[in-house]
Image (cartoon, rainbow, N blue to C red):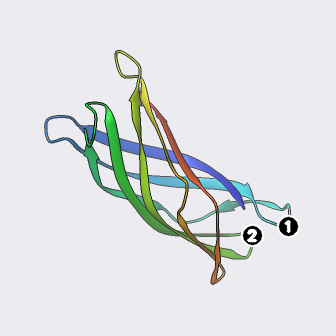
Amino acid sequence: TVLYGEAVVDADFATSSLTGTGSEFVGQDRDGAFDHYAGTIGLSDGKIGINRPNDFRIDYSGILTGNHEAIGLGGTIEGDFKGDPIRGLLGYDLSPTAVVDGVIFPGEVGLAVEVQ
């Protein structure tokens, strides 16, 4: 299953924290069908400057439904703020907890956000 969605991320550099949500997912299931997926992925407990001034770590979790599938996602994304001045952020979780209809699947989760 390959999904793309919209993310809204709030970065507070004064408190070195991140929060946000992912929603409006659309994608292709493992049988090749395209559909919209309902639900949101919460982004929480984000920290800025873990090992370097512009790196981050943020937890995510949620359930998405579409194409007769229920997809549960959870894990931690790690990445970096990009640009000088900062124009966005990019991060990945290469070993997420991904459960599709009760079956655990390997995969990866990416987060790419552009400053608006």
The picture quadrant where one finds residue 95 is: bottom right
Q: Are marks 2 and 1 in contact (CB under 8 Å)?
A: yes
Amino acid, disc 2 = Asn
Q: Secondary structure at mark 2?
A: loop
Q: Residue furthest front?
A: 51
Q: Looking at the rendered structure, which numbered label has been put on residue 31? A: 1
Picture residue at 48% right of the left edge, 62% below the top: 40
Q: Is residue 42 above or below residue 48?
A: below
Q: CA distance from mark 2 to mark 1?
A: 10 Å
Tell whether 42 sits left or right of 101: left
Picture residue at 53% right of the left edge, 63% below the top: 96
Picture residue at 74% right of the left edge, 69% below the top: 67
How many residues crowd around disc 2 within 10 Å: few (fewer than 14), some, or many (20 or more)?
some
Q: Residue furthest right?
A: 32
Amino acid, disc 1 = Asp
Q: Residue at label 2? A: 67
